[in-house]
Image (cartoon, grey):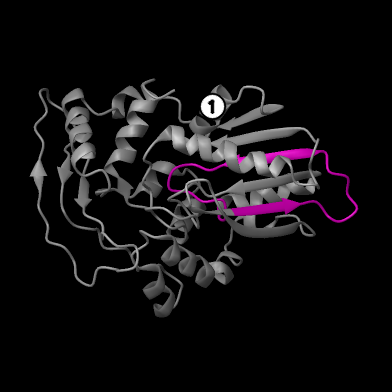
Amino acid sequence: MDLSLTFRSPSPFLLPKSKPSTLSIPLISLKPSPHRLTVAAAAGNMKMIEGVSDELNSIASQNLDYAAARRRVRSAFIPVHQQLDHLLFKMAPTGVRTEEWIERNSKGLEIFFRRWMPEPGVKIKGVVCFCHGYGDTCTFFFEGIARFIAASGYGVYAIDHPGFGLSEGLHGYIYSFDELADNVIEQYAKIKERPEVRGLPCFILGQSMGGAVTLKVHFKDPHGWDGIILVAPMCKIADDVTPSKPVLNFLTFLSKVMPTAKLVPQKDLAELMFRDPRKKKMVCFLQSPYNGLASIVLMIKHQSGAII
């Protein structure tokens, strides 16, 4: 397993103009392992996206640590997304009403919202609120899924977690799973009181890491939902890919010393995350975060039962 570590710009308004130097530190495991961990103080070079202009590639290659840059990339790529050759995009039902907006949460962060509603005149059966996974956003693959659910008569609402997608926060950095769950509870409590859905059955849908967040939301607020839906929830890491205890202890130490440092897998994650070859090719259109060390450690500890 090859990983690299880079340090983020201390200011959300200043983007680095030069590449940082590289430092490789091999970690020694106490027992033979097929994995090798490399920690380096450098950002990986982004691959060129095939089939788009040099201008779009230039936009996509900018530092995505902060929401302003991620929003610029999303705006520039909307026409490209609409032409992607995938069932979720090409066969999504028409007539669904969409809306998006931004609100500040109790921590002062701007949170991005998006909703999908049935056609005018269709009686709304209930509400589905979505929790996306790590490195994801509610504006890409979920777009097609949300349209199908809305076309079935449900109001669908989604947010980007702080630090992900179009919401404010350091990209991919999770300070606390508790805060992540609390933000979900806070934002969707407001959604439940919207006049168009007030009093309707409410369901929460969580995917991958969002499934873990959904479970935590349920434990914190067990009577807040009429049902929960879990899609490949992040409940446990397979034993054969769980870091050894020395490596986990080292990462835990680093997360305390450099909690916002980037930990960048060198393997093509699309090969590991998606079975559908078409989806693998489209991952380049999804804003790819550089994982914060603290985020990685939180996720590993969560799946071992230390958070929930």
| Residue 225 at x, y percent in the picture | 68, 28
Q: Is residue 307 magenta?
A: no
Q: Quadrant of residue 59?
A: bottom left
Please say if 308 is above or below 197: above
What type of secondary structure mainly makes up the magenta span? Answer: loop
Q: Which residue is mark 1?
A: 215
What's the residue at 23%, 72% (across, down)?
17
Whether the magenta-drawn stretch holds residue 137 is answered as: yes
Q: Residues within 10 Å of mark 1 (few under 14, many from 20)?
A: many
Seen at 45% across and 32% down, the residue is: 178
- Image quadrant assignment for residue 252: top left
The percent coordinates of residue 303 (x first, y second) are 39, 25
Left or right of 94: which side holds 228? left
Q: Nearer the viewer, residue 271 or 63?
A: 63
Relative to residue 138, is residue 90 depicted above or below? below
Which residue occupies 33% across, 27% down? 301
Apparent side of residue 272 relative to residue 225 in the rendered image (left or right): left
Range drawn in magenta: 113-140
| Relative depth, front residue between 256 and 171 | 256
Q: Residue at x 23, y 58 (%)?
A: 43
| Spot occupied by residue 205 in the image (x, y as percentages of width and height) | 62, 36
Location of the C terminus (image quadrant): top left
